[in-house]
Amino acid sequence: MARTPPPPAQQDLLNRLREYLVDEPVTDERSMFGGVCVMVRGKILVSAGKDGSLLVRVDAARHDELVARPGARQAEMGAGRDMGPGWITVAPDGVDSDPDLVVWLDAALEYNSVAADGRR
């Protein structure tokens, strides 16, 4: 059975993520959390939402700083069930420019390298 192609906003974001992460050890892309998760070093880095939003996994110590950025909010796993510190959802307008997207990817990659080493 053929796969349904992702919605245009999600596909556009995935293309931008792949371009930025071309030199990273991306190990997989899989459907999770209502989006397409990009795995780096065997750990979730980000997830591209169907609406073009971005779920980001960052260091919990930077959570308050980063969630204060435009378009950012505490990530939820269903209504009213937050995913905890270090999980942030960024609205499409919070990642529509390359510099904004890079801020989120850099923060996610920083945490990912620590998490992949088993220190977190």
Image: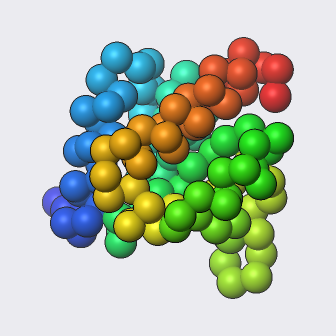
Side of 61 relative to 72 (left or right): right
- Image location of residue 62, percent across then percent down: 75, 43
In the rendered image, which quarter contains the N terminus?
bottom left
Residue 32 visible to an observer of this rendering:
no
Residue, x 30% and y 23% (percent of image)?
22
Where, by quadrant of the figure, is residue 80 drawn?
bottom right
Q: How many marks?
A: 0
Please provide percent x and percent y for residue 55: 54, 56
| Residue 20 picture location, percent across and down | 32, 31
Residue, far bottom: 79
Of the 4 image quadrants, the one containing the C terminus is top right
Q: How is the image coloured?
A: rainbow
Q: Is residue 56 visible?
A: yes
Q: Is residue 33 above or below residue 46?
A: below
What is the quadrant of residue 38 in the picture?
top left
Q: Is residue 55 above or below residue 98?
A: below
Residue at point 38%, 67% (across, down): 93
Q: Residue at x 76, y 69 (%)?
A: 82
User: Does 79 sit left or right of 89 as displayed?
Assistant: right
Between 115 and 111, the residue placed more toward the observer is 111
Image height of 103 relative to 12, above or below = above
Q: Residue at x 69, y 84 (%)?
A: 79
Point out residue 7 in the picture as x, y percentages from the top left corner. 24, 69
